[in-house]
Image (spheres, rainbow, N blue to C red):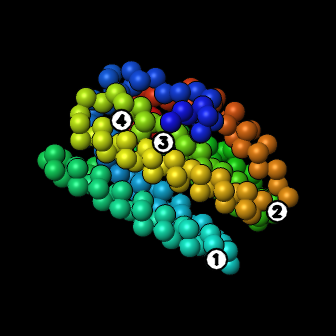
Amino acid sequence: MSEKTILKLQLPTDPRWVKNIVESNIEEILTDHAFCEQKAASNAITLIVQNPELSDLVQEMAALVQEEMDHFKRVHDIILERGYTLGRERKDDYVNELLKFLKKGGARREQLVDRLLFAAMIEARSCERFKVLSENINDKQLSDFYYELMVSEATHYTTFIRLARKYADGIDVNTRWNNFLAYEAIVIQNYGKKETIHG
């Protein structure tokens, strides 16, 4: 899978992030990852709460919530297997910076499309990070696990992009997405230095 062709991300993660930071902070990474899955489920629930009349979206988000919480439990199982304890939730500065790009006010449909593209962006970067982890981590269990989740995140990314196009209602999704990608490329330059999935 090429991030350039499928995910369109403009700036790849330096693989040295895995060797220099992740491998000496496995417990930290797993805690952060668990909360990333929980937040993804919460985001899908928010989309349901805000758009109950969109039955297709409700169905897809309900399935996504189940999958994200299954991933949360699987990460927590690995944490317990290794004798760790789930730590406190970490603030996700990367996600908070992406939130600044969302349109404030405007039509509800425009806000929905932006929220879907925001979710797609997080899934795309998570997918890319999981790919880098799966290919570079010196830990067979985690390498296999992150490869599996990379595939799953790619599916979530395409789901959010598809829904954004479905509910666009005259909004130029491609232009907005390209602008989002350009913004993300600026944001991500400051990351890849911490023991968090997006850090």
Left/right placement of residue 113 relative to residue 24 reads right
Q: Amino acid at mark 4?
A: Ser
Left/right placement of residue 119 relative to residue 84 reads right
Compare marks 4 and 3 and give the one earlier in the sequence: 3
Q: CA distance from mark 2 to mark 4?
A: 38 Å
Measuring from the top left, give residue 170's x and y in whole percent.
Answer: 85, 58
Q: Residue at x 60, y 66 (%)?
A: 47
Q: Amino acid at mark 3?
A: Cys
Measuring from the top left, give residue 174's x and y in whole percent.
Answer: 76, 45
Q: Amino acid at mark 1?
A: Ser
Left/right placement of residue 95 relative to residue 69 reads right
Q: Residue at x 34, y 27 (%)?
A: 136
Compare marks 2 and 4 and give the one earlier in the sequence: 4
> Under tag 1, what secondary structure?
helix
Q: Residues within 10 Å of mark 3 (few under 14, many from 20)?
A: many
Residue 55 - label = 1
Q: Split into 4 quadrants, where in the image is the C terminus?
A: top left
Q: CA distance from mark 1 to mark 4?
A: 36 Å
Residue ID for mark 2: 169
Q: CA distance from mark 3 to mark 2?
A: 28 Å
Q: Residue at x 54, y 67 (%)?
A: 61
Q: Amino acid at mark 2?
A: Asp
Q: Identify the image quadrant of residue 139.
A: top left
Q: Residue at x 35, y 62 (%)?
A: 70
Residue most toward the front? 1
Q: Residues within 10 Å of mark 2 (few under 14, many from 20)?
A: few
Measuring from the top left, give residue 108's x and y in whole percent.
Answer: 76, 65
Residue ID for mark 4: 134
Residue 127 - label = 3
